[in-house]
Image (tube, rainbow, N blue to C red):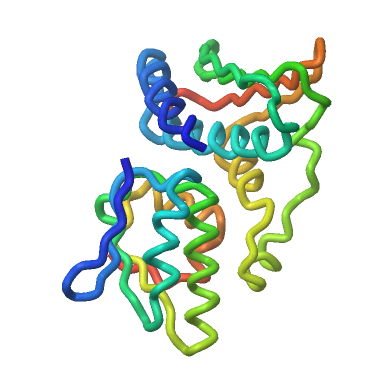
Amino acid sequence: MAALAGIFPFLEQELQSHRASSATIFAVSLAVEELFTNMVKYSPPGAGTVCISVGSGEGSCHIVMEECGVEPFDPTGAGEVDLPGHLESGRPGGLGLYLVRHLVDDVHFEYRNRCNVITVSKELES
Amino acid sequence: MFSVSVSEEGVVVLAGRFDASQVQAAGEVFDRLETTTRVNFEKLDYISSAGLGLLLKTQKRLGMAGHGLVLTKMNKLVRDVFRVARFDIVFPIEE
């Protein structure tokens, strides 16, 4: 998880250059953290690097996270979280992906050339 | 940068970015709490599910003994995360 210390300043600098609001920077940072930690958690030992790039168009920012040389793993395919149940039990498994779904506008997954490619989109001025 | 400390009055003070890499450090403070405790969020800029999970675990543990956390002075962005996660029905949140 030490990589997060490098990811956050990169995201903030890139998103500021695309004129994203502070609310968008917060939401996108959270989404990228949750998806990144998920990728690391489910990657086999010694798996490849996660490449992150930032772009924008039509009023939204688009963050692409790509991990190659791994089996397909689609975080968008997970079922809906039983949030009241998790809150009651005190074990909030799946909370990260729940937050991602509710804080950004779109999360798109595709598997191509043995790479998991996740694209997160969010309005720049949310 | 993240920091967690306990003031002379027994208030837990969070500051900076509470991400997944900081859960162990925060756990060393929260796991030692044994009574109702105020947590000051005034200087906390960011929190993700990892931090929320630690707070929920602590709240459940303290609740079994009739105690709990009282969260104070959250900024709007952090409070929005609590609202979306519906943690605002689990924790008392004060201005």
Q: Position of residue B56 (x, y in %)?
A: 53, 66
Q: Quadrant of residue A70?
A: top right
Is A39 in front, or is A78? A39
Residue at the far bottom: name it. B66
Left or right of A101? Residue B93 is left
Residue at the far front: name it. A46
Q: Residue at x 39, y 76 (%)?
A: B33
Is A13 in front, or is A62? A13
Q: Position of residue A31 (x, y in %)?
A: 56, 35
Is A22 in front, or is B43? B43
Q: Is residue A82 above or below residue A125?
A: below
Residue at the far left: name it. B8
Q: Residue at x 42, y 26 (%)?
A: A6
Q: Quadrant of residue B13?
A: bottom left
Q: Is residue B26 above or below residue A101?
A: below
The tally of labels here is 0
Q: Residue at x 24, y 74 (%)?
A: B10
For the C terminus of chain A, the image quarter is top left
Q: Position of residue A29 (x, y in %)?
A: 48, 33
